[in-house]
Image: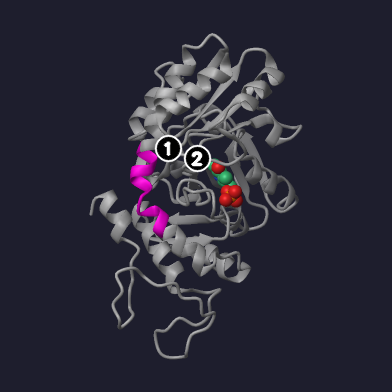
Amino acid sequence: MKLETLAIHGGNIVTDSEKPVIQPITLSTTFIHQPESMIYARANNPNRHSLEKLLAALEKGGDAAAFSSGNAAGVAVFQALEPGSHIIAPDDMYHGLKNAILSIFKGVLEATFVDMTDLDKLENAFRPNTKLVWLETPSNPLLKITDIASVAKLAKEKGVMLACDNTFATPVFQNPIDLGADIVMHSSTKYFGGHSDILGGALITKEADEFWEKVKNVQIGGGAVPSPMDCYYLCRSIKTLPYRVKGHAEHAMVLANFLSHHDAVERVYYPGLKSHEGHMVAANQMTGFGGVLSFLVKGGADAADRVISKLKYFTNATSLGGVESLIERRAASEGPDTLTPQNLIRVSVGLEHLYDLLEDMEDALK
Ligand SMILES: *Cc1c(COP(=O)(O)O)cnc(C)c1O
């Protein structure tokens, strides 16, 4: 099946005798004991099973585990590591997960944060107890691009597992497992949900190995699982994922070009631009450049805030991946320790009409 077909048919496991076309929502928390039946909703549920089957297929993995948030998915990987293990992660890792490593796992795991786009720096960061390399590409909010296949090769040589946060790219544009990753992570809250109304996360493994058993144990034992309703709505949203993200990326490309020629703009970060330092690697490993871009406004934080306050169709809110355009001055969301420039605006480009978006942005930059 091609991706668009898989997105529509890959998650249906209708077993009801009435034969509905769409899989119903199963709310029961418990199941009548019989051989082969599901037992209890924390361990499994038909809607979660459908979602996990669909996610594994989309990311070309052997199995998937759905969580109640992207952070819960990421934290499950860290929890499955032996205490004393060392992690190498990007210096601009998603701030919520970086904070989790530094706070929840303080004294339990060691971590080094490096610029992953520099393979020498990555190689120098390995220690005898390194057990995991964590990747995020495109990164948030600078849209830095890391060469997944090269990092995978290095990790393999060192006998270390590679996990990749694929939230920004989605499986429509990038399949980390095909490029050598062992585990893929998603915040389903973003493009999978696609309408800013579901919180969720997912892990997909290349194969159901010994480490994956531990991850599943954290999922079921820790219990940070999504509700049947959330799983149902995610399966519903994913049916349109390929068309939505192609639309987002088309709009982002035009907006990035527009901004890169505007006098009030200092710099634009979008991997689809030839001027972006990761453009060639992105063009090689992705089939589209995604729907998120960032730009620096001339004149600092105040000027950036002024632009945001004038916009009509870009809502000043955090998060990304919904059909509506969202915009924020990122440093304000990331807190005082952030390395993000104070005048950086991150845009999640939505599916409103492109001309409305361009006109709105042009007016706000005046
Ligand atoms: C949002 C996000 C997360 C965290 O996901 P939640 O669903 O908010 O817990 C992790 N990584 C990236 C790249 C994200 O954008």
Q: Give above or below for 198 relative to 179.
A: below
Q: Provide residue 321's location: percent of width, then percent of height.
A: 49, 42
Q: What amino acid type is highlighted by mark number 1?
A: Leu
Q: Is residue 60 visible?
A: no
* The one of 282 and 141 positioned closer to us in this rendering: 141
Using residue 9 as the reference point, say whether residue 254 is left or right of it: right
Q: Which residues are magenta?
A: 236-246
Q: Around disc 1, counting alpha carbons within 10 Å, would you say few (fewer than 14), some (14 to 19), or many (20 or more)?
A: many
Q: Main secondary structure of the magenta part?
A: helix
Q: Secondary structure at mark 2?
A: loop
Using residue 196 as the reference point, say whether residue 248 is left or right of it: left
The quadrant in which residue 257 appears is: top left
**Between marks 1 and 2, how big is the CA–CA gap?**
6 Å
Q: Give above or below for 336 relative to 302.
A: below
Q: Secondary structure at mark 1?
A: loop
Q: Earlier in the sequence, mark 1 or mark 2?
A: 2
* The one of 96 and 213 positioned closer to us in this rendering: 96
Q: Residue furthest top?
A: 263
Q: What amino acid type is highlighted by mark number 2?
A: Glu
Q: Is residue 191 visible?
A: yes
Q: Provide residue 28's location: percent of width, then percent of height.
A: 51, 80
Using residue 213 as the reference point, say whether residue 236 is left or right of it: left
Q: Provide residue 248's location: percent of width, then percent of height.
A: 41, 36
| Residue hosting label 1 | 351
* Residue at the image position 49 percent from the left and 74 percent from the top: 44
The quadrant in which residue 124 appears is: top right
Which label sits on residue 324? 2
* Residue at the image position 33 percent from the left and 67 percent from the top: 12
Q: Are marks 1 and 2 in contact (CB under 8 Å)?
A: yes
Residue 181 lies in the magenta stretch: no
